[in-house]
Image (cartoon, coloured by chain):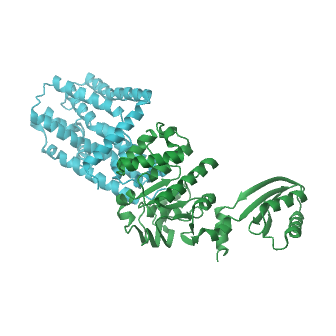
Chain colours: A green, B cyan
Amino acid sequence: MSLIHVKDLSKHFKILNRREGLGGAFRDLFSGDFRTVEAVAGISFDIDAGEIVGYIGPNGAGKSTTIKMMTGILKPSGGLIEINGLVPYENRIRQAQIMGVVFGQRTQLWWDLPVIESFKILKEIYKVDQKTFDEHMDMFNELVGLKELYSQQVRTLSLGQRMLCDITASFLHNPQIVFLDEPTIGLDISVKAKMRTIIKELNRTRNTTIILTTHDLGDVEALCNRIIIIDKGKILYDGDIKKVNALFGAYRTLKLQIDQFNETTLQTLNDKLTEKFGTDHGITISENEESWTDVTIDQARTPLSEVLNHLMTNFTVMDVRIVEISMENVVRKVYDGALT
Amino acid sequence: MRSIGEYLRLYFMIEAQYIKGRMQYRADFIISSIGMFFSSLATLGIFWVIFESVPDLAGWSLMEMVFIYAFYMIAISPMQILFDHAWQLRFHIQQGTFLKYYFRPLNMMFYYMSEIFDLKGLTQLAVGIVLLVYASLQLNLDWTLIRIALLFITLFSAALVQISIVVIASCASFWVLDSYPVLGLAWKLREFSPYPMTIFDGAFRFAFTFIIPIGFVSFYPSQLFLRPQDVSSLIYFSPVIGIGLFALTYWVWTKGVNSYTGTGS
């Protein structure tokens, strides 16, 4: 049996149709004019122990609502969630014992307390025995050098340090499932890398199931074997990451600022690229804004470095940027049938 | 499930650390304690001004008023010290930081309230105790064992009433965007509690006795010790009122917690 079982899950919110202006606000007080918003509109999936699943989608797709239902905060409007055979909403305290949750930049440690004391209180709350506690603390120390932070008050930590503490703290009681909501948001690249190593390592050594929601496709690429893409409350894709990799792993967009840009530049660019890489070059060119040109390259067909080289030698390029593909683009591509 | 003993142990552990942490901000502690000390005495100043021009207030002498006030200060201290986090509930709810209280295998009210232990409330408690002893010496009150037991029972009930009023008012933020007016009302009302209910006319007295029972925070129980001969039999219900009101508060809190949907993230 799977660890997490979700079947036809849905959640509606009733929202008042608000009117404009002060007069409208007064009329709203007595209004029965509600509309129903379907935040989650019938989703089903099963997750097994030890999986790292990326749960992704654009803003307002229904990610948070799903996570809130899985963690027992929200009661579903319809359908079923079972974690270890129990319904989260009805068994909040028991479920909390087997879960760890990290919600973005909101720390769950005690703001005024030194880091080590937060961990000691968590030990007490989750009834972690001394031996396990010591083992875990040694391991966390190895992974992130936690010892140096022990005596610091949580409020004095940098965002990166605090997030590292929060992540490791969520694993202290050896939970079966850890929910990570935007764990790398706002972090610089080195901390991000560290964070990813820890998550991977903890998953590997204890077979902890990890549900990761993120906007950072780099996180997904680095960590997940399986992804679920959700948009407008429905699942667009659920499966192996390799297929999706082609969507955001292989595509990179070059933004170029070309000197003396005019109406014919796009055509000339295309001609030059076809000349070099043939008609099947997998490159799309479009004008962006104010003389910036987007060149989107499918790296599976044409290496980015060669395209860049070729363009640099044939045009006077004043400025270049390389853009990672965005979540919105991935979702758009899925809609366009890229995965079917 | 955790036993009460386990919760107590955990509570002491959290608060011991919390106090240690706060003590590092020594200036903050000293200044807020001094502030609390003087604001506690301010009401006494008002009494003094009143009694400069009148010999008694609806038949109550200055020293009796001091006793009622001292009882009130002690009765509101547990709210101040243990439930002070209630005041910040609306910020947590608005900003979505309330979510984290769902994630621990603990009773949520316990976990939420345990996060703050208000040290300056201890100053208030100390001033209250000193004033209570002083007033009862001045009034030559006869403290039998039964009366002392009654004092503890009525203080406990009064504390529950005060806690309930503030926590219920703060729970309004589960349903109302800006609950400040509700909290402000609860805060204002408590300023009426150290006065003899007999100075209010019918409608107010009825409200303060049966609807928002601030009469039970200080005046009715104080009567038991100051004028036992003309005490109303209502006072013997004070534990029922205190416990009943707290049970209602807990029910409202649970409703609120279950209806909260959080902010987007």
Nearest to the observer: residue A311 or residue B232: A311
Q: Is residue B164 visible?
A: yes
Q: Quadrant of the N terminus of chain B?
A: bottom left
Residue found 13% across the figure and 42% down from its top: B232
Q: Is residue A256 above or below residue A233?
A: above
Residue beneath the point at 29% across and 38% down: B76
Taking depth in this image into account, of B249 and A324 the one nearest to the observer is A324
Quarter of the rendering containing residue B49: top left
Classify A175 as above or below A12.
Answer: above
Would residue B60 be found to the left or right of residue A172 on screen?
left
Residue in view at x 26 percent, y 34 percent: B74
Q: At 80% across and 65% down in the image, what residue appears?
A: A286
Task: Report the label total.
Answer: 0
- Asked whether B226 or A234 is in front, the reply is A234
Where is residue A77 drawn, in percent x and y? 43, 69
Q: Is residue B56 visible?
A: no
Judged left or right of residue B151, residue A317 is right
Q: Position of residue A273 (x, y in %)?
A: 86, 67
